[in-house]
Image (spheres, coloured by chain):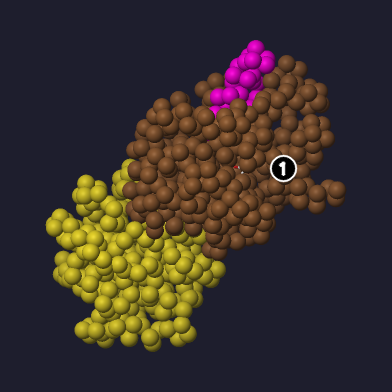
Chain colours: A brown, B yellow
Amino acid sequence: MKYGVDEHGYYGDFGGAYIPEMLYPNVEALRKQYLQVLEDNDFKAEFDQLLKDYVGRPSPLYHAKRYSEKYGANIFFKREDLNHTGSHKINNAIGQILLAERLGKKRIIAETGAGQHGVATATVCALKGLECVVYMGEIDMARQAPNVSRMKMLGARVVPATSGSKTLKDATNEALRDWIGNPEDTHYIIGSVVGPYPYPEMVARFQSIISYETKKQLLEQTGRELPEYVLACVGGGSNAIGMFYHFLDDEEVKLIAVEAAGQGINSGHSAATTALGKDGVLHGMRTILMQTEDGQVIEPYSISAGLDYPGIGPQHAHLFKADRAQYVSATDEEALQAGLLCCQLEGIIPAIESSHALAQLEKMQFKNDDNIVICISGRGDKDLDTYIKHFGY
Amino acid sequence: MNRLQNLFANKNDNLLSIYFTAGYPELNATVDIAEALEKAGVDFLEVGFPYSDPVADGPTIQQSSEKALENGMTVNVLFEQLKDLRKRVSIPILLMGYINPMVQYGVERFCKKAAEVGVDGLIIPDLPMYEYEKLYSGCFTENNLSNIFLVTPNTSEERIRKIDDLSTGFIYLLSSSSITGSNLQVSVPIEDYYKRIKAMELKNPTIIGFGISNSSTFNKACQYANGAIVGSAFVKLLATDNYLPLIPDFIKNIKPDLSSRG
Ligand SMILES: Cc1ncc(COP(=O)(O)O)c(C=O)c1O
């Protein structure tokens, strides 16, 4: 694949494995084994079966008629919101739990921001009867209290990350520290296409099911496998990579990634990484990173906890630099309005993360026969409070 | 030869190194602390430059880094302070920190500046061998800086050999796979690990770090390696009021047989 990873874990200038020696044996063992496990027939069979019977895949590709009318093109929603646990995060969690099981790991750790990945991880740990510890920033635990309870109900221990800015990036640091101290029995399920190689690649493969299904569904529904545009929101970038994956080499397909601009790119309260970031290293990867001139990581801001991350996955950094995908952003306000529009035109309450992708439609010009696919990465149940507060329902 | 290589050429046992975070507990404490440590008889120093996301560090060093950043410590400020430091301190100095602030400063520029102000080497836990060799080893050697690699009980023999080949100062042995500030474990498998390393007859000296906090852990470490590094335990001392006069006794507690320098 032209935009794929090289043998050292790099996508162009980005990626690699910037990890302390303490993590080297774990990461190296993963690197050596993950492809072998993923290509094993027994693994494939169980992965496919769980995605079908447990997650509810394939997720529908829904032709959104009223959206299509409004924007004057054929608009399709890839319905990851209909997955078990309510988002695309479960695709990766299922893949990694099956991998962990085959590597003989007994204990699972994860980081979470909004709680969606934490819930997905707690879910698959319950499914497999494995111990589960989820690190979550102290501030996020307060902001996303219902998801904390959900994880606990599912049997996970939720540990507050009290260091640094007490949000997602610090939860990730805590998970990495836990892994350093527990190198033998523990597998770390990272929740996005971030972290040291092979994580970005492995998570991308698990999420690539999204575009794999989309191609088939488009062919069935429209007679054409390739759409004109594919859109997705980007936090770390896992739903976007999953949505782009099987279109990357079809250069005529325009890929659009939507970041969270928060209160505006230049407001000082933003998470628009490609607009504001520079080359840097965080969480074991070289990527584009929001940081001060002195190289200290800046705490991002977005109304959506799932997009509130100061970096992006290294493959995104490469797609951005190589101009293969276009990186744009939507503000809190634009996303909230787009979310409400989706409720009222299609009867679907999207996650605020996904609403960022929807917001981009307002800024585009289409031809009548353009086919456009948008990833609805999750459902908005978790965000009801935020929507309700904003609109005063 | 840099000062570090010089030190090892003249002395190869019971070496004591102290780590502290620059800019902690006060922004301008760096030079005073370094001078007090030299006077107390410490053999070489590791000066931490703070990073917002120190994954290899436990709570003590995390908090010292946070405080240092709050105090206004930056790479620029540190280099300014070090210019003065070399007027007062002559023992070898290593900078220890994470790669991102170096990338922002420019790794080449960082190495050049470090050498200029009298730094002898760098310890960058999140700069792995592959990236070091491919991207940066030139900057280190041109500036006569030793790059210090870490080895853990889980590092393979093949990898240790490779690290030994690339090293030009010493090899930093971790007593266990852990973040900074955990306790030194001298259980049977750990002794086996130290013995295994010793039997490899590496070209470079070895120094044991992480979890060394007093004379018994120090002495134990020195049975297997050329010396040891105290970090978190010293950073904790810096949290007490009026810590400077306490430094000689702290060092004496670790190395009772030491006569202080002037
Ligand atoms: C519904 C939803 N969409 C998107 C994201 C952002 O993550 P990623 O960019 O990895 O898809 C999250 C993260 O929590 C999420 O919950």
User: In the drawing, does residue A74 fall left or right of residue B25?
Assistant: right
State the residue at coordinates (50%, 52%): A132
- Is residue A310 something one can see in this rendering? no
Query: Residue A169 or A318: which is nearer the viewer?
Result: A169
Residue type beneath disc 1: Gly
Q: Give the x, y percent position of residue A370.
A: 70, 19
User: In the drawing, does residue A386 fall left or right of residue A163?
Assistant: right
On-image quarter of the N terminus of chain B: bottom left
Disc 1: which residue:
A380
Q: Give the x, y percent position of residue A11.
A: 45, 35
Q: Magenta region: which residues?
A: A207-233
State the residue at coordinates (86%, 48%): A393
Q: Is A268 within the magenta?
A: no
- What is the quadrant of residue A366 in the picture? top right
Q: Is residue B240 above or below residue B122?
A: below
Neighbours of disc 1 within 10 Å: few (<14), some (14-19), many (20+): many
Q: Is residue B201 above or below residue A391?
A: below
Q: Give the x, y percent position of residue B179.
A: 39, 62
